[in-house]
Amino acid sequence: MRLLIQRCLEASVDIAGQRQAGIGRGLLVLVGIEHEDTQGDAQWMAAKLVGMRLFADEAGKMNCSLREVNGELLVVSQFTLHAQCAKGNRPSFIRAARPEVAIPLYEFFLQELETLLGQPVPRGVFGADMQVALINDGPVTIWLDSRDRQ
């Protein structure tokens, strides 16, 4: 499971010209699910995401978590995070999980986040053609992969 985490001042997802979800200060998280990912991966990633200290404290150091700053969270599925680009010029997505595997795990991940945060998590629509917008704050962009837990 891969997450691309972007600290933002605001972010939104539109589908067919209609606003699906939007947030203010917080994190936009793009989620890619691989066919070998498990619920254990989703649990670890959710806990890691909620606990990451990506926001400034009163001294200006990145020392506060999403919860500590009452930040918002927007989650968007993105299978292209598992693109393999070593051969040729067209990316291969063979490692990305098929929808019948990815959708239940994506939903499980969202449920874990909602449990940890104690509130609903705005999201995109799995498999939809989405337009994602954000104002990246910092910029702060973090790559997190459940296969690399060092």
Image (spheres, rainbow, N blue to C red):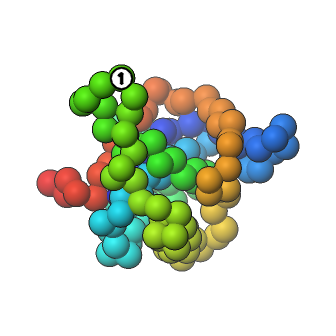
Q: Is residue 133 left or right of residue 62?
A: right
Total tally of numbered discs in the picture: 1
Residue situated in front as seen by the camera: 50 or 93 = 93
Q: Amino acid at mark 1?
A: Asn
- Could one spot residue 17 in this view of the protein? yes
The answer to whether residue 58 of the structure is visible from this angle is no
Dot 1 alpha-carbon crowd within 10 angstroms: few under 14, some 14 to 19, many 20 or more: few
Q: Residue at x 63, y 62 (%)?
A: 121
**What residue is pinned by disc 1?**
89
Q: Which part of the image, by quadrant, shows the N terminus?
A: bottom left
Residue at position x 46%, y 26% from top? 139
Q: Position of residue 39 (x, y in %)?
A: 38, 75
The image shows residue 128 at horizontal and vertical percentages of 67, 50
Residue closest to the eye, 86 or 57: 86
**Considering depth in this image, is 121 or 118 the residue closer to the camera?**
121
Q: Is residue 77 left or right of residue 4?
A: right
**Residue 123 placed where, x, y %?**
65, 56
